[in-house]
Image: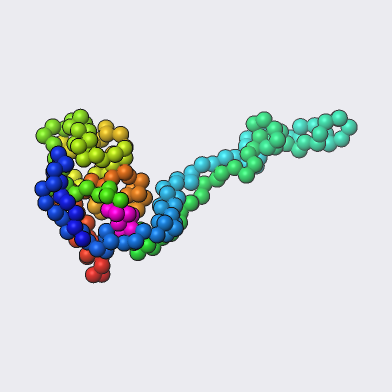
Amino acid sequence: METAVVNLKGEKIGKCELSEVLFGQKPEPHFLYEVVTAHLANQRAGSADTKSKAEVSGGGKKPWKQKHTGRARAGSNRSPLWRHGGVTFGPHPHSFRRETTINKRRLALAQALSAKYAEGNLIVVDKFDIANPKTKEICAVLKKLEAGRKPMLVSLRSSANVELAVRNVPGLSNIRPTELNAYEVLNSTRIIITKDAMDKLGGLWAGKEQK
């Protein structure tokens, strides 16, 4: 497998070999759904908390006697039925975490990358560098590469100018090869990966395969 290597003007300047294991997988929608939903669940803090009627301050005294008042029976003015009362079945701190094995996460990443490659949404550039740390220059490059609304730049982050310039680009995510996951890949319109980052990714994958 191979794909074209382009420069920052979008001009083809060579070819790059692609790993069959990384970019030749057949995507399985339900499998990807399981891994992505687990990833999103693991991002939830689960720290929301509400007070039940036992936790709300006050309410120690019965508001009025049980009978012969003409009003409904009440045992506490902190009942969930009352204003300033407790919350019924409200959220309490707990974990939303779902465990997924490392092999499932790696397979999901390979399937996501394969899907992007099959759609023609994988762009390999020889290097990603600009002369000045200006967002305008990055936007011009992304326009030439037809990166779309939510592109992902995968690089080794060797350029300080790029690091500064990409921070204000709406929708652009800038990550390292070691940070890739199925959700980030599927959530992007196009993957822009530098040649050295592609080599790094292939080397990491080959090392894990040997283990």
Residue 152 percent coordinates (x, y): 27, 44
- Residue 138 in sight from this viewpoint: no
Query: Which quadrant would the C terminus be assigned to in this image?
Result: bottom left
- Residue at x 26% of width, y 63% of height: 21
Q: Does the magenta stretch include residue 3?
A: no
Residue 156 percent coordinates (x, y): 18, 48
Residue at the outermost right position: 68
Quadrant hosting residue 80: top right
Residue 87 percent coordinates (x, y): 63, 39
Disc tally is 0
Question: Is most of the magenta stretch helix, strand or loop?
Answer: helix
Q: How is the image coloured?
A: rainbow
- Residue at x 30% of width, y 34% of height: 170
- Residue at x 26% of width, y 67% of height: 209
Instruction: Give, as a single range, the part of the protein colored magenta.
Output: 109-118
Q: Is residue 193 left or right of residue 51?
A: left
Up/down of 173 relative to 198, above or below: above
Q: Is residue 93 left or right of residue 188?
A: right
Query: Which quadrant would the N terminus be assigned to in this image?
Result: bottom left
- Residue at x 13% of width, y 43% of height: 11
Front residue of 190/99: it is 190
Front residue of 73/151: it is 151
Front residue of 159/22: it is 22
Residue 210 percent coordinates (x, y): 23, 70
Q: Is residue 115 magenta?
A: yes
Quadrant hosting residue 206: bottom left
Quadrant hosting residue 112: bottom left
Residue at the outermost bottom position: 210
- Residue 172 in sight from this viewpoint: yes
Up/down of 63 relative to 96, above or below: above
